[in-house]
Amino acid sequence: MTDHSLAVLPGFVFGPRSPHQPVDNMKAGAPEFIYSLINGPKGRPMPSFGPMHPTYVHVADVARAHVLALKAGPSNARKRILVQGGYLFWRQAAEYLVKTRPKLRDRLPDLDAVGGDEVRSEWIHFEAENAERVLGMAELKTWQEMVDDTVDELLVKEKELRNSARGNRGHASQETLPRRNRLSRVRTTALHKARSSVRRLFSIA
């Protein structure tokens, strides 16, 4: 039996999460790498992610590749299709954000501080021509688009989680009010009883 299947193999996938995906932690999933660039104490060095390969692909391109693979005609051989937008080092992303997001400058790492990941001069390159030859994906989103889309989504989620936390605290405080009122009434009643007892003792004397 001939296998005509296509296997879509993306690089490291980044980009905004689905609006229907519940997020209760800013450090959940691949966006954590980019969030670490805009979250942390001022003056910190670049974060270190270890021996991570610099390949990336925008999540929208991954979705598009799967749709095109389903529509692709039959093949005379099994094909593995590598889908990648290119290569990106996180220092490049931080430098880009420093230039394009002045409001985030105080949240970004200190690029002059010692430590963290650097831009390497050598790494393994992948052949991804099948994405264009089989799926017709001649152009994919740039790493700048990927960083911008991810940061935009992260900032929105961050604000939503903060507002939700404030709302939960406010709701909790409202729930405690009846209990506090009951305790206050109990204390007041006990104080009145104590005073009455003291008055009776003195009257008897």
Image: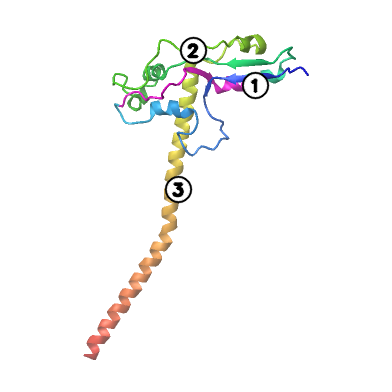
Q: Residue furthest bottom?
A: 204
For discs 3 and 1, the disc positioned in front in the rendered view: 1
Tell me where residue 181 appears, x and y as whole percent.
39, 64
Counting from the top left corner in percent of width and height, residue 66 is at 65, 21
- Could you tell me which residue is drawn at 48 percent across and 34 percent down? 28
Crowd rating for badge 2 (residues with CA inside 10 Å; few <14, some 14–19, many 20+)? few
Quarter of the figure with residue 69: top right
Query: Of label 2 and label 1, which has the lower sequence position?
Result: 1
* Left or right: where 143 falls relative to 127: left
User: Which type of secondary structure does the marked residue at label 1 adopt?
Assistant: helix
Residue with the mark numbered 3 = 168
Look at mark 2 in the image and give the residue it sits on: 124
> Looking at the picture, how far across and down is residue 191, in whole percent?
30, 74
Task: Quadrant for the C terminus, please.
Answer: bottom left
- Is 123 located above or below residue 103 in the figure? above
Q: Are marks 3 and 2 in contact (CB under 8 Å)?
A: no
Instruction: Please rate how many residues cluster around mark 3, counting C-alpha atoms within 10 Å: few if below 14, some from 14 to 19, many from 20.
Output: few
Earlier residue among tags 3 and 2: 2
Q: Which numbered tag is attached to residue 21? A: none
Circle 1 residue: 66
Q: CA distance from mark 2 to mark 1?
A: 25 Å
User: Upstream in the sequence, badge 3 or badge 1?
Assistant: 1
Q: How many marks?
A: 3
> Disc 3 versus disc 1: distance between alpha carbons?
40 Å
Mark 3 belongs to which amino acid? Asn
Q: Secondary structure at mark 3?
A: helix
Which three-letter amino acid code belongs to the residue tagged 2?
A: Ile
Q: Which residues are magenta?
A: 44-64
